[in-house]
Image (cartoon, rainbow, N blue to C red):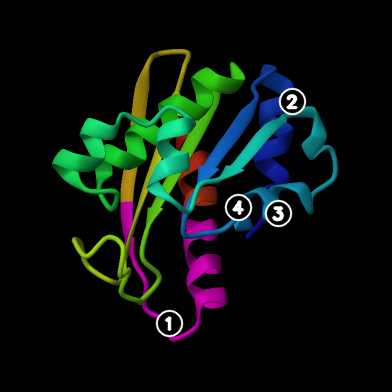
Amino acid sequence: MNFKNIIKKFIKNNYTISFMESCTGGGVSNSLTNCERSSEIFKFGAVTYSNEFKIKMGVDSDIISKYSVYSSECADSMSKAISSYTNSTFGIGITGKLKREDINNKSGDDDIVFISIYNSINNSYKKDKIKCIYDTREKNKELVINKIISLLEEEL
């Protein structure tokens, strides 16, 4: 799967997109920018591995304290914050673990990734979570990226 059809629909509707990625480490941004004309819709990609930089980019620290950095609530805060920061039509927040323990954030399952797509047009969220099933980070990132593409196609 790739972003080609999404790019065409975004251009047609004059939509833009930005990402706040954690566990995918810029993989979603990379996948989008591998496609022609991505520069017409892509505004910004932030890789916020640490809680500190999630907060600096607009995630409410109370959400991290109350629900953990590995939660649907955190992904929602990430997606809305990045959309607001960049004035993008859509913001996507991705947080979770790719089958490994995080010594700095012990809570949450070690194989669940939370995805949130914020739509600024109607102030709504499309959310999902995905279980990482592969033994490599690369394959699990690909799994997450493909899920995001599917969710965006549904949203459009």
Secondary structure of the residue carrying numbered label 2: helix
Q: Which residue is mark 3?
A: 30
Q: Which circle marks residue 153 in the picture? A: none
Distance of label 4 from label 3 (alpha carbons): 5 Å
Q: Earlier in the sequence, mark 3 or mark 1?
A: 3
Residue 48 percent coordinates (x, y): 50, 47
Secondary structure of the residue carrying numbered label 1: loop
Q: Which residue: 67% across, 33% down? A: 44
Question: The residue under label 1 is which amino acid type?
Answer: Tyr
Question: The residue under label 4 is which amino acid type?
Answer: Val
Can you say whether 110 is above or below 22 in the image? Answer: below
82 on left or right of 125: right
Q: Which residue is mark 4?
A: 28
Q: Nearer the viewer, mark 3 or mark 2?
A: 3
Looking at this view, is 10 or 28 the one in front? 28
Instruction: Place residue 110 in its image quadrant.
Output: bottom left
Q: Earlier in the sequence, mark 3 or mark 2?
A: 2
Q: Residues within 10 Å of mark 1 (few under 14, many from 20)?
A: some
